[in-house]
Amino acid sequence: MTLARRLPAFTWDRIAPLREKAGLHPDGAVDLSIGTPVDPVPGLIRDALAAASDAPGYPATWGTPRLRSAAAGWLARAHGVPVSPDDVLPVVGTKEFIAWLPVMLGLGPGDVVLQPELAYPTYDIGARLAGASVLASDSLLGAGPARVRLVWVNSPSNPTGRVLPAEHLRKVVAWARERGAVVASDECYISLGWDAAPVSVLHPSVCGGSHDGVLAVHSLSKRSNLAGYRAGFVTGDPALVADLLAIRKLAGMIMPGPVQAAMAAALSDDVHAAEQRERYAARRSVLLAAFAAAGWGVDQSEAGLYLWVTHPAHDCWSAAELLAAEGGILVSPGELYGPAGKRHIRVALTATDERVAAAARRLRELGSGNGLRTCGRGAKFERCSASALPKQSTWLPFVTAVGAPFQPVRAVRSVRVLRPVRAVRPVPVARSRGVRRPSRGDRLRPAST
């Protein structure tokens, strides 16, 4: 059996049918699912990349002294975290590092990776690549006697936006040190605190001034719109960072030289990051108000790049289908992040101002009963209220009656009989012998538009 056969399907392949439905909207889809940045890369970063583009030689795996100093300076300046530039290691995107960290730490069969109940899926992938087991629990007591070798913490959380207070993080660090486990803190959204102030696991209030057994992972994908550059770094325990550097040298895990120069420029400038933060804050306010007005609830979401949203009449899949099929809004079903997310959807703030405004407008229309429901061919059907909808889709009988192609998704569980609505005109029937009465399918035929 190959390694690929031991891994689950790619997370985003599971929402391909929803993406297709959202794309049928007359005004196009609003993609609030993956969380990929859409705003321009700041000019000063592009200038640094271009200036370093004549790079015929191999770059340093450890990173340039300028890059490492810029990272250490940003941590001290923005988050009160003192680290030595010698303990900073650039990585080719933090997803790559997260996926391979268990392997690089030497985990294998019999070892356990402890992660949050709702978690970024790559934590689980990393454990599988190493042959280790995963335990998803928000309680340290849930680990029991398991041989935990790696503990993932994520604050602010992806997907929920929950912020872990310093006291909680301090208990996790102490617990892990007693058992000889490594604490890896995914801090990719640490600069996006809205209703709470995130704290780094490397802050003295958490780790007691010692970084032993602790790593912090940082990304520039959202802070500086550098997802396409694959720019991140890890820092913390000097011995662990040295081991990781040795492995990455042998494996050729090297950040390209021009990207190192761009990353150093990004970490040395706070103005562009503050401007980007304000963009996300404004989009967050628009989406918060729109979901609330349409009868949806927003839980946690006190920091980070997402809203953790629920509807009282829907589970995560039927809610995502409703938004995609009837609003052209693509979101992530919460179950993608663990069974505990089955009632929620994750809504990303990463869309342009125009698309966010479009999403808000569509939510208002659905909530006020002015939203048009559509079948697979985009034909007008009936107006609906999102707050009054049952869990399952109710346009299946119409699609079946007119013979439109229909591919059911898992959110469709049953069929509800439709009552005639204003847009449906009854078929005239001649009052003579031998003329059959119209079938129910005839009576459900839509009026011409």
Image: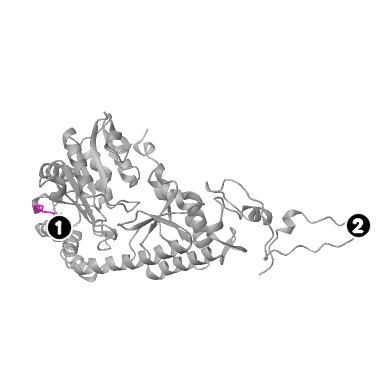
Say which amino acid is labelled 1: Ala
Q: Which residue is mark 2?
A: 433
Q: Is residue 145 above or below residue 231?
A: above
Residue 194, quarter of the rendered image: bottom left
Please report the bounds of the magenta region as a residue range: 81-85
Crowding around mark 1 (Cα neighbors within 10 Å: few <14, some 14 to 19, many 20+) is many
Horizontal and vertical percent position of residue 3: 34, 37
First-in-chain label (1 vs 2): 1
Q: CA distance from mark 1 to mark 2?
A: 87 Å
Residue 430 belongs to the span the image colors magenta: no
Quadrant including the C terminus: bottom right
Identify the main secondary structure in magenta.
loop
362 lies left or right of 206: right
User: Would you identify the image quadrant in which residue 240 lies?
Assistant: top left
Q: Secondary structure at mark 2?
A: loop
What residue is rendered at 15% in x and 57% in y?
71
Q: Where is residue 215? Give x, y as percent.
A: 18, 46
| Residue 53 visible, this angle | no
Name the spot of residue 221 as percent of width and height, x first: 27, 59
**Residue 84 lies in the magenta stretch:** yes
Name the image quarter holding the N terminus: top left
Task: Say whether residue 393 is left or right of residue 329.
Answer: right
Find residue 247 and report its image quarter.
top left
User: Can you identify the residue that label 1 sits on?
Assistant: 71
Q: Amino acid at mark 2?
A: Arg
Q: Residues within 10 Å of mark 2 (few under 14, many from 20)?
A: few
Q: Toward the viewer: 177 or 103?
A: 177
Query: What residue is shown at x 44% (from left), y 61% (from top)?
Result: 292
